[in-house]
Image (spheres, rainbow, N blue to C red):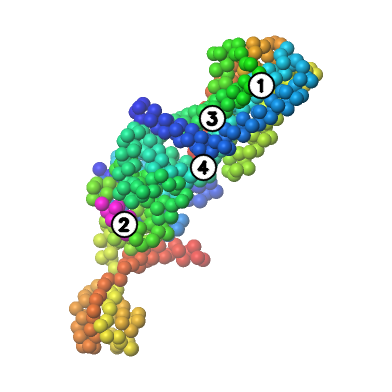
Amino acid sequence: MKALSISNLKKEYQGGVQALKGIDLQVEQGDFFALLGPNGAGKSTTIGVISSLVTKTSGSVKILGIDIDENHSLAKKKLGVVGQEVNFNQFEKVGDIIRNQAGYYGLGFRKSKENAKYYMKKLDIWDKRNEQARKLSGGMKRRVMVAKALVNNPELLILDEPTAGVDIELRRSLWDFLTEINDNGTSIILTTHYLEEAERLCRNIAIIDSGEIVENTSMQELLTRLEVETFIFDLLEPIKELPEVKEFEIIIENPKRIKVTVGKEQGLSTVFKKFTELNIEISSMRNETGRLEELFLGLVEPSLKEKEL
Amino acid sequence: MSASEQIRALATILYKEIHRFMRIWTQTLIPPAIMIMLYFVIFGTLIGKRIGQMGGFDYVQFMIPGLIMMSVISNSYSNVVSSFFGQKFARSIEELLITPLPHYLILLGWILGGVARGLLVGAIVTIVSLWFYDLNVNNWPLCIFVVISTSVLFSLGGFLNALFAESFDDISIIPTFIMQPLIYLGGVFYSIQLLPPFWQTISLANPILYMINAFRFSILGSSDLEALGFSIYSALAMIVGFIVLFSSICLWLLNKGRGIRS
């Protein structure tokens, strides 16, 4: 069964702006799916339609096989959404916000309390349960948003840029947490501007641009399309000038770090051979993140240029 | 959602609404009590003694039902309009829209919240009024019906206002420029029989006049309505009619997503 099935979804806002031009999207149950696109591409509109915050013009949306128009209530029971912006009453206490959210789903008082406690502990906000939400840091508020979205134990969780503006520590702990709940069977759809995040977490990906899906494939398949790959080498001894190398592109980042871009057909052995010839000793190496970024820009650049014009 | 889930969800909205106005009780419960006390002191005790009888009753006695109703009306309305618009403004209404809650339950939750505050303030005003005059209720069932149904009606009015409002200015325009004049000209402080025939006829177009007089009748056993040839039942039918009309409009707008969905 599909966790999400969108068919010919269109949204035209007042004033004639076509935010979605008939998109089709399928997300498998248990998947960790990335929905990427530049600003204004239609990601949030798509999420808005799925979560009933935006009224669609036409098309159909099914959550776990249930059409949101035919059985709105049942479909919504299976859904949890973390919006892009803080959307709770910040004058309420953290514990109340999360318990009330469970109540809106019809959970009993005891069950609401139990679920709220579980997710507050999981997300390290249990100690903040009696604090007014407005006193929390931005990162803590994000955790409240995630706990709120999970309190009804949804089968499909949608996160709209959940790590925007949060520090690296929280981002990583959130990644681990999301991976854990995905491993436990929750299907996840993630939109993010951090392509490294999508590359690290997601198995499948769709790229939306100007209201149309321009790519929909597995992450692995997409990354294999890269013609070149970039590696960063840390050196044991500093080098003063760029060695003459014809086989691959080399850039000195600083005297003890160089960046090498090799073609897919070349492989790393060519690089190591050349380094041995040049007496360059390596202390460590890593793949440069942002491989997805290159592909992403390749797919959406035409429309970005159009917008600039 | 099953019936028990709906009841739990409704209880959550109601709890949240009551908790909201109780948390800010210095803004929601105390000011109406002080205002009404001032009305009693100034119009009841100081000026009222010089006025003498109004509609066959002592002036303070005549004023009490009107003042209770005025508090119920304005507090039911303002509770719903400020709470719902506040949630719209802060986008916390999204918390509810993404859930399986049917629209009628969202509406009912807010209306019950408005009624809860309206009745609580009405009870406070009644207690305050007991310091100034001994109150005997003529018809308890009618009294309870009129006060609850009027509170429901103005909570619905507040909800409608909140759906259309796009700024905080929009939620004060109707209370200031429409409701307040209608309340003050609806017979809270005077009997419309004092007015010349032309203004009496104009006053009859004010729906709040019927509510205040129906309530006055339930407490004092007499009001302007019968004197002007209207039955109390016509006032009750009008209140019920408006409730049906306003709830239908609210539900239709909620289903359309007016003011809450893009």
User: Which residue is at a point 62% across and 31% down the rendered structure image?
Assistant: B32
Which residue, given by chain and number where applicable, does mark 4 sit on? B88
* In this view, the mark in front (1 or 4): 1
x then y, percent, for residue B145: 55, 17
Which region shows up in magenta?
Answer: A172-180
- N-term-proximal mark, 3 vs 1: 3
Which residue, given by chain and number where applicable, does mark 1 sit on? B132
* The disc label shown at residue B117, or none: 3
Indicate the chain on which mark 3 is placed: B
Indicate the chain on which mark 2 is placed: A
The amino acid marked with disc number 1 is Phe
For mark 3, does the 10 Å Cα neighbourhood hold few (<14), some (14 to 19), or many (20 or more) residues? many
Q: Which residue occupies the extreme front position in the image?
A: B131
- N-term-proximal mark, 1 vs 4: 4
The amino acid marked with disc number 3 is Arg
Side of B85 where A161 appears, left or right:
left
The amino acid marked with disc number 4 is Lys
Distance between the alpha carbons at the discs numbered 2 and 3: 43 Å
What is the quadrant of residue B195 in the picture? top right
